Image: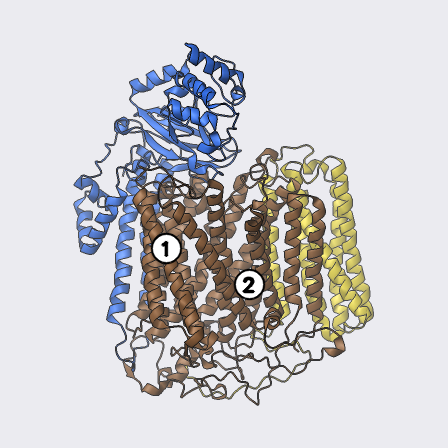
Chain colours: A blue, B yellow, C brown
Amino acid sequence: MRLVRGPAHAIAGPNPWSPEALVQCTGRSMTPRRRALVRNAALTLVLVLLATGCNALADPRAPQSTVFPKSDWAALIYDLYNKVFIMAVLVFVGVEGALLLFIIRYRRTDENRLPSQTHGNTRLEILWTILPALVLFVIAIPSIQVIFASEEVPPNVSAMYVRVIGHQWWWEFQYPELGISTANELHVPAGQTVRFDLQSADVIHSFWFPFMGGKVDVVPMRVNHMWYTPDASAASASPYLSQCVEFCGTEHAMMRNRLFVDTPEQFNAWAALQRQDAQVPQGDDVQRGAGLLLGGQCRNCHTIKGTTAIGVIGPNLTHVGSRSTIVSGTLDTNVDNLAKWIHDPQSVKPGAKMPTLGFSEADARSMAVYLMTLK
Amino acid sequence: MRSVAAAPPITPAAPPAHTEEHRTSTGLNNRKVLMWTFLGSDCMFFGALIASYIVYRGKWQQTPTPNELFDIPYTSVSAFALLMSSLAMVLALAAIQRGDLKRLKIWLLTTAGLGLIFIGGQIYEFTGFGAEGMNLSTGTGGTTFFVLTGFHGTHVSLGIIWLLSLYTLARRGALHQGRSLDVEIAGLYWHFVDIVWIIIFTVVYLLPV
Amino acid sequence: MATIAVPSPIAERRVLRPIAPTGVWSWITTIDHKRIGVLYGTTAFIFFLIGGLEALLMRTQLIRPNNTLLGPDQFNGLFTMHGTTMIFLVVMPLSAAFFNYVVPLQIGARDVAFPRLNAFSYWTFLSGAILLNLGFVAQTVPDNGWFSYANITERAFSPSAGQDFWVVGLQVLGVASLAAALNFLVTIVQLRAPGMSLMRMPLFTWTTFITSILIVLAFPVIAIALFELMFDRLFGTNFFNTIGGGDPILWQHLFWTFGHPEVYILILPAMGIVSEILPVFSRKPLFGYPFMVYAVAGIAFLSFTVWAHHMFTTGLGAIATSFFAASTMLIAVPTGVKIFNWISTIHGGSLKLTTPALMSIGFVSMFTIGGLSGVMHASPPIDTQHQDTYFVVAHFHYVLFGGAIFGLFGGIYYWWPKITGRLLDDGIGKLQFWLMMIGFNLTFGPMHFLGIDGMPRRIYTYPANMGWDMWNLVASIGAYTLGLAILVMIFNIAKTFINGERAGADPWDGMTLEWTIPSPPPAYNFAVIPEVHSRDPFWLQKHPELASHELTESTGEITIGAQHVGDLGIPAVHAGQDGGHEAHGDVHVHMPDPSYWPPIAGLGFFIAGLGVLIASATTYAALGLTGIGLLTVLVAIYGWSLEPVNG
């Protein structure tokens, strides 16, 4: 197992339907020794079970799947998961098999028979105290290695720095080195190590992109960290979905986010755009929308760089039109959805912190048209 | 495995001196075992509160901090009163065990009185801290200090009520040599509360931040 | 059940004592451990139905993506109440029902050490349970999860009274659990029949003992955490309030210092039940009794060292994470020993697949799965992927439903004839078992896949195209199947009351002392306290030929005659005699009289809790009500300590 994590390695994502992937999914890695071991140990029944089970696990349509690693960290976890999984399967087969066998073999047939009154077997019991302890030791060692390998960014690696701030119920992403602040959609360059500082504006949230690795809680009064390097090939399957995974109140379920792993060129283009001030409204309808938006209460909570809107309670809207989704990853970005959201937020996301400000549908539509121009 | 001999049925033991005394497996009295077990449990109550105090200790974002307000000589005196009450408690138990009901009453009252001195001192101290700007909702220092010491003070107060009701029983003549266990159990509780105060006093007042 | 009591010297005290032997008042004032056990069991079963309905509502909401049957707050309230109910109002009291009913019988005692305290525990439990569920009446249901992580529970984020119902209800429940646990500890330490040394105690008594120790040491920690949270919400203290400098992680440490031992508080009683059932239906003693005892003790000890494995994602640092990973894996060792020993108990036996035996086998097989998935996320890196997903939901339901509920239901089928004198129908029982087994695996098996596919817990809805639709549908169908299984159980219970087969004293060819006395047992349990000379005393008494064999393996096959049951009954007790619960003419056992004080004390806690709730919602003046409630408790305790003790 590769325990040194760095930016250079790119792990090709397995094709989930390939025979290799299915075999890998059963926890059988490629060494002949282990393959033999598994073949000897596992019953046909189990392989069938696993094959069906893993087909389901390895559902490529599941965009939050934990078993298609696309980063160095996720790959380490996945390796470990496979090791533990195969051991669990072996123990499962052994224990349940013995249980089933004994139930069948020792069923009562003779009501008068008193079986041998075995009270125990000390040697056997010591054996099955020590044996599991050894198995667990074998799991513990690589686990602890991975813990330490994923603790801090190695000193020789230069990492991009992103500050993640959890809010009820949306995500804020700041790139202090690049002067960018955006919401709910995170962009990182493929092959670039990224280090996240995790902070909360209110309650505990949890930040997680399963394809990139594990989750780390976002705790008020603390700054937690995580880091990983998206695979160079990860850009092809972008975006990756996720959502808050620590219960954080009413709309915990609708605190979703997306990760775009860009090629370095795409990322640079995106960053350059995000640094700019907002588009100046042009055209009557757009200007009308901008007037409504900037003249009303919206600016108390939202920032639109280059305008009078400088609020920091809600998401930064400077480039909202360039994002693929709105309302924390729950709706596609388009005029209809934006208008619906502005007109009556509570019908879209009950309990959301965005108040109903009483804009008519027509007004909301104008504002939506303006927001769509903020590419 | 030894065989089950057709054991002679055990007739219930002859009623002992006191009606509540059953035969027990350990030979100890049930209520005494209950009190010991409860005190084990109570350790965890105090443990959780002391832990809460230690977690925030020195990380207070408030002025004044608890340590700036403490008057160690003053609190030492009231702590001394509480420690002396344990001595009085021992003497009370000794008195009832030898049947000296007069001294029992004196020592019970002394114990409760010393406890009252401690509680009075605590109330005075709390009032002073409040006047100087630290109360229950002042930062984490005020919160953890008052709840921890207040929880202990509640224990002492309940102990005083218990001692005074024993005193009332003794005055009515309901407490006699045969019921020394009643005093012994109250004593277990009282000593425990004292020992806990030694720990709290050390952790909260004496250890430098 | 007739209470055998000589007229007590009450009159001279002028303290009113209830005397009704039957009817509602006799149940309210009872201090008979068996009746209290029945009260616990009945209450727990009612709450099981409520908690189950909550679960069915949730599964209906999640049956398809973007469902709008329930709103977010409703759903959040349901999962909070479902978890809290199942843990505190179902599994714990159902275990307590068996502690109450069975333990004194197994150790050869006439009652628990403190019968009034025992009644007090029940009534306080009921008060807490009602306080917790009052949120439904007030229409502000607690909705921050059974774990109620700070700081979302602070008034700033949860202004409604919902959270207060949770805080107050749980505090009162904690008092009840502590009182009960202290009582059982003293009972088991003090009231064992002559000759019943610790290592001769039945394993269920052992798990009761260890569970009680866990409660005694773990519940104070949650009590303090709740107390601190109550102060935060009521008086503006800063224990978990980030604005005042509080650290929400402190709550997690306190909560899980309680919470992990709590997991074993929930599972150990079921383990004990299974350890009673499997030997009886295999007709051979429990395999490796000493190891089983050591394993239970080891699990209990280790359970206090593993709490932070619930917090692997909170940023503990590599060293602490590694330590808690290691201790967590260590706890799997004694757990494994138990599973191997249960299987070895079946090995070489003569296994009769009655409903209790099936339930126990269900326990062993399903608990194994839960244990294995537990080992998977004992590894912190893996846990960072599984934490707070449906994989964890699957894991702990395999442990707590596949484990605890199967075990406890096994206990119901096993001891029902002892309690009621009638056997639950075995055929219907088997139907229930298979429905449960299928429904359970349909419900919770797919949740492993949902977790691996990244579905988080506690979300009230999910979009389509996440790859979650099918498994959610399957899980919901499984949940309805489970509901059906419970209906079958209710039918079986009803049928048994109408025309259940009468059970003798010893319907299963049991091994322990409770089977030596009539079903249902008389109020005084044992006319004569038995003397114990071995483990499984009744078994050896029925098979004296076994007694000469040593503890070792392979004693050879012994065929015995058909008339082995009952013909060697303990002389004075007339074991095997049906319907013998009429008092023997010559038995005059002094049993304590019923008392009004325990329910009054329970009511006092209810009033006190109500005071806090009202104070939290309106004005501090309502704390006066709390004062009145606590005073009531004090008066009641005074009252019962002045009551003549044994008469």
Mark 1 vs mark 2, foreground winner is: 1
Q: Which residue is mark 2?
A: C181
Q: Secondary structure at mark 1?
A: helix
Chain ID, mark 1: C
Q: Position of residue C118 (x, y in %)?
A: 59, 67
Q: Position of residue B207 (x, y in %)?
A: 65, 42
- Residue A36 sits above or below residue B96 on the image: above
Residue ID at (70%, 45%): C620
Q: Which residue is mark 1?
A: C480
**Dot 1 surroundings within 10 Å: few (below 14), some, or many (20 or more)?**
some
Q: Secondary structure at mark 2?
A: helix
**Dot 2 surroundings within 10 Å: few (below 14), some, or many (20 or more)?**
many
Q: Earlier in the sequence, mark 1 or mark 2?
A: 2
Q: Position of residue A355 (x, y in %)?
A: 52, 28
Q: Amino acid at mark 2?
A: Ala
Which picture quadrant has residue C463? top left
* Quadrant position of the N terminus of chain C in the picture: bottom right
Q: Nearer the viewer, residue C498 or B44?
A: C498
Q: Nearer the viewer, residue A276 or A40?
A: A276
Q: Amino acid at mark 1?
A: Tyr
